[in-house]
Amino acid sequence: MKKLVIGNLKMNLLSPQERERYLEFLSKELQGKKLKNTEIVVCPPFVHIESFVKSVGKKVRIGSQNIFWEEKGAYTGETSPVMLKNIKAQYAIIGHSERRRYFGETNETINLKLKSALRAGLTPIFCVGETKEEKGMDMTMDVIVRQIQEGLKDISRVLIEKIVIVYEPVWAVGSDVIPTSNEIMGAKLLIRKILTEKYGAKYVEKIRVIYGGSVNAKWAKQVCVDPEMDGVLVGRESLVPHEFVKIASIING
């Protein structure tokens, strides 16, 4: 199973010129790189997705940073997974901590989005993790159990292996403070335990559990390689193609 390195470009690349520069530099950084053990995904803002799909070729897969749960209709400002699938996007980030924090996303709405992504044939990138306050109250386990149980409600065994799960401790996102390898390993084991109890071991062995939160090249070994995670979700460092590809090279081994 290949490692997964996902770049979340967030609300950046403010013009077509910025987008083209980014794509040019990313292409140059990937040229000649042999990342046979790694799958690279980039999730740009919606307005750039189609251009990314047309430009990146086979070396990089493209995803969205969010979706809506309905296929079409009177939902002003939303983007459906079917739209994304039809322009050849392949992944969708769902339940990112910033979506939960700023837009009030709940486990229930995240569940609707996960189901919708699966129906459309997208691979969901499902984020779970505790806040600083929850960690301080020793609630990490309770939070992750609830987010997974409610987020995956009524999702079948047949479909569960299509979901990527991100352990994203909210207190680490954009903070330059990261968990220890043991903390990350503990979260991974907990996530796999929850999934195994819910679905059975043979149905979850192909699920990739990755880490997200202040990932950079300096810490890539600590947050992914040492705790034996299946990849990383990279935020701000993915905006610098040299750093992003450097992280992918470290994860690739």
Image (cartoon, rainbow, N blue to C red):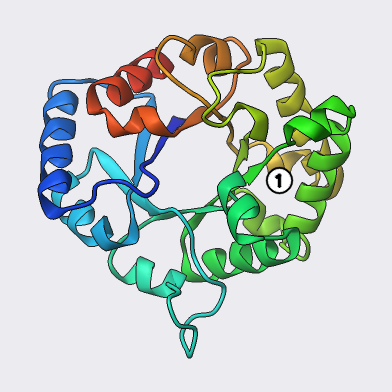
Along the line of sight, the residue nearer the viewer: 135 or 151: 135
Along the line of sight, the residue nearer the viewer: 241 or 123: 241
Q: Quadrant of residue 179?
A: top right
Amino acid type of the residue that numbered disc 1 sits on in the rendered structure: Tyr
User: Circle 1 is placed at which residue position?
Assistant: 203
On the rendered structure, is 54 left or right of 89?
left
Neighbour tally class for label 1: few under 14, some 14-19, many 20 plus, Cα within 10 Å: some
* Residue 13 in view (yes/no): yes
Along the line of sight, the residue nearer the viewer: 17 or 115: 17
- Picture residue at 37% right of the left edge, 49% below the top: 11
On the rendered structure, is 73 left or right of 15?
right
On the rendered structure, is 148 left or right of 113?
right
Q: In the rendered image of this protein, does residue 154 appear above or below residue 194?
A: below
Q: In the rendered image of this protein, does residue 14 appear above or below residue 222?
A: below
- Picture residue at 23% right of the left edge, 38% below the top: 59
On the rendered structure, is 134 left or right of 88?
right
